[in-house]
Image (cartoon, grey):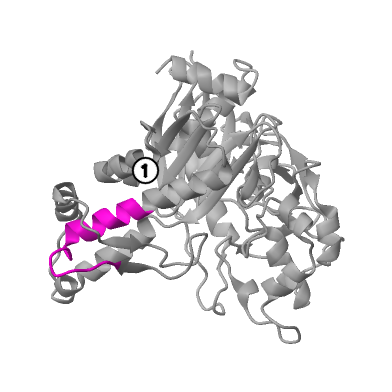
Amino acid sequence: MSKQFVGLDIGSSSIKGAIIDLDALHVSAPVSRQSPGAINGLPPRHFEQDVSTIVDVTKAVLDELLTSVPNCQGVLLCSQMQGAVLCDEHRAPLTNYLSWRDQRILDDHPTESGTYYDVLNGHLSDDEKTLVGGELKPGAAPSLLFWLAEHGQLPRQDCTPMIFADFVMSQIANAKPVTEYTNALGAINLDTRDWHRGVFTKLGLDNIRWPHLANFFEPVGEYQFMGRHIPCYPSVGDHQCALVGTLIQANELSLNISTGSQVSLLSQELRLGPHQIRPFFDQQYLNTITHLPAGRSLNVLVDFVTEISRAQDMDCDPWAYIVDAVNAAQPTGLSSDLAFFAGPMGETGSINGITVDNLTIGNVFLAAFENMAANYASCAKRLSPDQSWNGIVISGGLPQRLSALRAAIESKFDSACRLSSGSEETLQGLVALALVIDGQAATVADAIQLIASNH
């Protein structure tokens, strides 16, 4: 009988799962349910979700999968990062899930200059902000807790903040309150690999009961199903898990391109610099720049070129035409800047160099793809000024569908790129973690090589 695990990906738009087969080294029988949306009627910038509903949906996905896995060896999870649920000492929820998409800290502070986020940053030194990886973003747990503390809304001083997937397992598997290192964004001291309690003290959060920091291979609870007791493991960050699913190699630059995009490069040692730094597996660090313009910005252009047809209720898929038009286009001096949303590349986009002859859909989208490629090249040099990578792996839905985008990237980097073949990189990444848990690989890097050699 083959060794099988169940993998879950608890995301912001869907809750997915699949069977992990360690003999075949792949996932099968995928199940997906829509994740419950935000609670209605909240103030602007607030984004909360009902915890009980998400627990119920997750349990339904897990139970459906376990009916097909009579000898399940364990349940592995990856999850959306940041955000928090506050719990008491018995793991009962004291709040809704405060999502990573919650932006309330950008409200103006009533007594100090600027926003609550400005005030938070004013409490910290540049070194402290750097040592939490540049990840103290508006939706990070410390930011959300700081806002609650400023409003006198912390439910109690000794409450425990939990990543949502770990909270789910605490409810259905009696799991201990832990945070796996890859999910400790904005709160871990990267130098000591412990909670940055000095930051917590400066933010007035020193009485918060932070969870134990755990490795992904440490079981934290048991799920009881049809008389079986199935070990459960702490959730890992979906970004890091997805990179494992691309079978990322040492010194390989990663470009993940979907609704947003990221440029990432692994390092064995801590490299401080003008980028984000996330804990990775095997005691490594993930140097990354996230929230780069990609699908969300392209949709702005799509909405513009289809405005008339949509106003006339003409239902059509514009992408087939766009792809053909881009494939027939040639550079004409038209340029584009896709920074329509605030991020590392700015917050104002543009289309420049328009002439009577070059303002066509093909030319506009070709310029957009070239801008994306230029952004990735610029950010890659920020991660590694000496361009020390020895290969490039591209993942995500957009580059798989758009050959012109891949060509623009290859031209800008003057390098061949490896296209990740997986469509569910996060679940594929859990296969590598399961190999380590099962003892078939000593490290995640070893597990990646084992999977790569069998594909």
| Percent x, y of residue 57 | 50, 51
Query: Which part of the image, by quadrant, shows the C terminus?
Result: top left
- Name the foreground residue: 4 vs 364: 364
Q: Is residue 40 left or right of residue 196?
A: left
**What are the residue bounds of the magenta stretch?**
352-371
Amino acid type shown at disc 1:
Lys
| Percent x, y of residue 430 | 53, 32
Residue designated by label 1? 412
| Percent x, y of residue 137 | 63, 61
Give the residue displayed 50% in from the left and 74% down from the top: 40
- Name the foreground residue: 443 vs 210: 443
Q: Vertically, is 152 above or below 168? A: below
- Bin the neighbour count of mark 1 within 10 Å (Cα to Cα): few under 14, some 14-19, many 20 and up: some
Give the residue displayed 71% in from the left and 31% down from the top: 218
- Name the foreground residue: 280 vs 134: 134
Q: Is residue 389 magenta?
A: no
Give the residue displayed 19% in from the left and 68% down from the top: 306
